[in-house]
Image (cartoon, grey):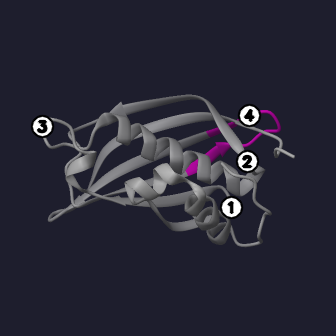
Amino acid sequence: MADHPAPSDPLTLLRDINATAAFNRWCGIEVLSAGVGHAEIEMPWREEVGQYSSFLHAGLVGALIDTACGFAAATMVGRVLASHFSVNCLRPAVGHRFIARARVVKPGRTQVFTACELFAVGDEGEQLVATGETLLTPVEPRG
């Protein structure tokens, strides 16, 4: 994540960070909500993010979980890098859009543990499609 001054509003902080990430812009990721220790992001479905069976590509499932977890951690400790993450794909990710909801489970000075749920939103509403966890390391701003 880019270096940013920490505004008092976590939503402003995350929207500013998100705007600087070219990958997030390509994906169409938007920050829906944020508070201290949690973040919610959304990405619309489009053909380019699918795999051969027209499901959301597992790489993007992981990217959404990683991004949401990193954002949740950033609201508490600032700039972070993932040192480990895991993803559990529960069912094919099919929907009009995808929402990732992440929260900090345990913040720390040298590592932050987070968890996330990813939902596909379709005609029938939200359906849980994946869960994940990340271990993030706070990093000093580059100067």
Residue on which disc 3 sits: 53
**SS for dot 2:** loop
Q: Amino acid at mark 4?
A: Gln
The magenta span reads 103-113
Marks 1 and 3: which is nearer the front?
3
Check residue 112 for magenta coloring: yes
**SS for dot 1:** loop
- Sequence-first disc among 1 and 2: 1
User: Picture quarter containing residue 107?
Assistant: top right
Q: Amino acid at mark 2?
A: Arg
Residue on which disc 4 sits: 111
- Sequence-first disc among 1 and 3: 1
**SS for dot 3:** loop
Residue at screen point 65% across, 71% down: 12
Cβ–Cβ under 8 Å for marks 1 and 2: no
Disc sitting over residue 85 in the figure: none
Give the side of residue 80 with respect to residue 120, left or right.
right
Disc sitting over residue 36 in the figure: 1
Give the side of residue 86 with respect to residue 118, left or right.
right
Q: Amino acid at mark 3?
A: Ser
Residue at screen point 63% across, 47% down: 104
> Can you say whether 19 is above or below 135 in the image?
below
Residue at screen point 68% across, 65% down: 13
Cβ–Cβ under 8 Å for marks 4 and 1: no
Give the side of residue 115 with respect to residue 107, left or right.
left
- Sequence-first disc among 2 and 3: 3
- Sequence-first disc among 3 and 4: 3
Image location of residue 83, percent across then percent down: 63, 28
Marks 3 and 4: which is nearer the front?
3
Q: CA distance from mark 4 to mark 2?
A: 12 Å
